[in-house]
Image (spheres, grey):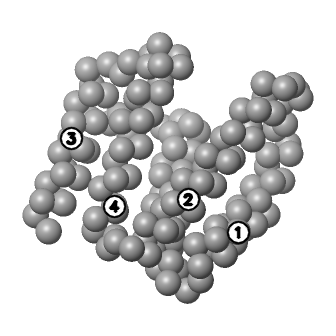
């Protein structure tokens, strides 16, 4: 989450870019969901992502170890499975029913941060989460 303020850092710009591109990715996934099977679209997403991001990843390779390899493979597999399930969901339900489920990611991130790192958000972050979740629930109810 990005807090309001005047400090602009490279990390903030990367976070804004990531959020913007993720939104574009979700929108394009919905638009393209009827053009091919979910498996074909998932494969296309993986190939395009690998082609665009592999050069940057190769420049930042960590030292090889079994835990790093296991975490990398697990992360990639879970991401692929999540995207594939989203493609299947778009086939059977309207986007207005699926979109609010994206907010679950916020709660999952908080939960994982707590379980894995012992970090809980501060009061301002909780307030921001509440505003975002309330807006999402309100928009779903008003449709």
Whichever of labels 4 and 3 marks the residue nearer the N terminus, that label is 4
Q: Give the distance between the C-alpha atoms of the residues marked 1 and 3, in whole angstroms.
A: 36 Å
Whichever of labels 4 and 1 marks the residue nearer the N terminus, that label is 1
Q: Give the distance between the C-alpha atoms of the residues marked 2 and 1, in whole angstroms.
A: 10 Å
In this view, 45 is above or below 109: below
| Residue 90 % position (x, y) | 43, 71
Q: Quadrant of residue 45?
A: bottom right
Mark 4: secondary structure: helix
Whichever of labels 1 and 3 marks the residue nearer the N terminus, that label is 1
**Residue under numbered circle 3:** 131
Q: Quadrant of residue 125?
A: top left
Residue positioned most to the top? 118
| Residue 127 % position (x, y) | 22, 30
Circle 2 Cα neighbour tier, 10 Å, few/some/many (<14 / 14–19 / ≥20): many
In this view, 54 is above or below 119: below
Left or right, residue 36 beside residue 142:
right
- Closer-to-camera residue (124/112): 112
Task: Tell me the residue at 51%/68% (across/down).
Answer: 87
Left or right, residue 123 beside residue 20:
left
Whether residue 77 is visible, yes or no, is: yes
Q: Give the distance between the C-alpha atoms of the residues marked 4 and 1, in whole angstroms.
A: 22 Å
- Please state, as top left, top right, bottom left or bottom right, where the C terminus lies in the image: bottom left
Left or right, residue 56 beside residue 126:
right
**Residue under numbered circle 1:** 43
Q: Give the distance between the C-alpha atoms of the residues marked 4 and 3, in whole angstroms.
A: 17 Å
Whichever of labels 2 and 1 marks the residue nearer the N terminus, that label is 1
């Amino acid at each position: 989450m990005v807090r309001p303020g005047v400090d602009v850092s490279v990390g903030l710009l990367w976070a804004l870019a990531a959020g913007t591109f993720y939104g574009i990715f979700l929108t394009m996934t919905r638009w393209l969901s009827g053009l091919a099977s979910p498996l074909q679209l998932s494969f296309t997403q993986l190939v395009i992502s690998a082609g665009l991001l592999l050069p940057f990843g190769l420049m930042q390779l960590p030292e090889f170890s079994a835990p790093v390899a296991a975490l990398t493979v697990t992360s990639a597999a879970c991401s692929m499975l999540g995207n594939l399930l989203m493609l299947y969901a778009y086939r059977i339900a309207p986007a207005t029913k699926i979109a609010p489920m994206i907010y679950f990611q916020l709660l999952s991130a908080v939960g994982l941060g707590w379980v894995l790192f012992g970090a809980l958000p501060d009061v301002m972050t909780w307030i921001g989460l509440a505003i975002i979740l309330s807006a999402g629930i309100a928009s779903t109810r008003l449709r």
